[in-house]
Image (cartoon, rainbow, N blue to C red):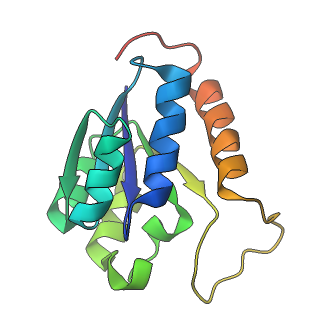
Amino acid sequence: MRITVIDGQGGGMGRVIIEKMRKEFREQVSILALGTNALATSAMLKAGANEGATGENAIVYNSKDSDIVIGSLSIIMANSMLGELTPKMAEAIMDSKARKLLIPIYRGNIDIIGLQTEPLPHLVDTLIVEMKKYLGGIKHV
């Protein structure tokens, strides 16, 4: 099972996600950290990702081989993250056959009606519950 976490800017959200995934799943899953920049990738690697890569080509290339892609809602929106997330990246993520588990955090001019505003740690806890459902007790890497 290959789980890809995508983040940009300082990698703070990706770091929190990977730390909680490691705590919950230990080494049962393989985590690939993909950052839009080196700082984000580094933060996610320090949090416990197995591998990491940076930039547009890394995200485009690796998105297609993932079983699950995790990130904020902005990873499917071209030019988000202050322009770090390119249209090619957004398209590759959306075209991936991977299950996408997206956290509804976006600092742009978009409001998603019907969502409750929750702090990041609560949203990541909900993400872990969804991953457990999706993984269905898988015990291998």
Q: Which residue: 65% across, 56% down?
A: 120
Residue 59 visible from this viewpoint? yes
130 sits left or right of 115 in the view: left
In the foreground, 118 or 43: 43
5 sits left or right of 73 in the view: left
Residue sticking out furthest to the top: 139
Q: Quadrant of residue 55?
A: bottom left
Residue 87 pos. (x, y %):
32, 78
Residue 80 visible from this viewpoint? no
In the foreground, 69 or 15: 15
Residue 67 pos. (x, y %):
39, 36
Residue sticking out furthest to the left: 57
Residue 93 pos. (x, y %):
37, 59
Q: Count numbered badges in the picture.
A: 0
From this view, report whether residue 139 is shown above or below residue 79.
above
In the foreground, 59 or 54: 54
Q: Which residue: 37% across, 25% down?
A: 1
Residue 52 pos. (x, y %):
22, 46
From this view, report whether residue 95 is shown above or below residue 70.
below
132 sits left or right of 55 in the view: right
104 sits left or right of 32 in the view: right
From this view, report whether residue 39 is shown above or below residue 133.
below
Q: Which residue: 48% across, 38% down?
A: 19
Q: In which quadrant is the C terminus drawn?
A: top left
From this view, report whether residue 93 is shown above or below residue 51.
below
Q: Which residue: 79% across, 66% down?
A: 117
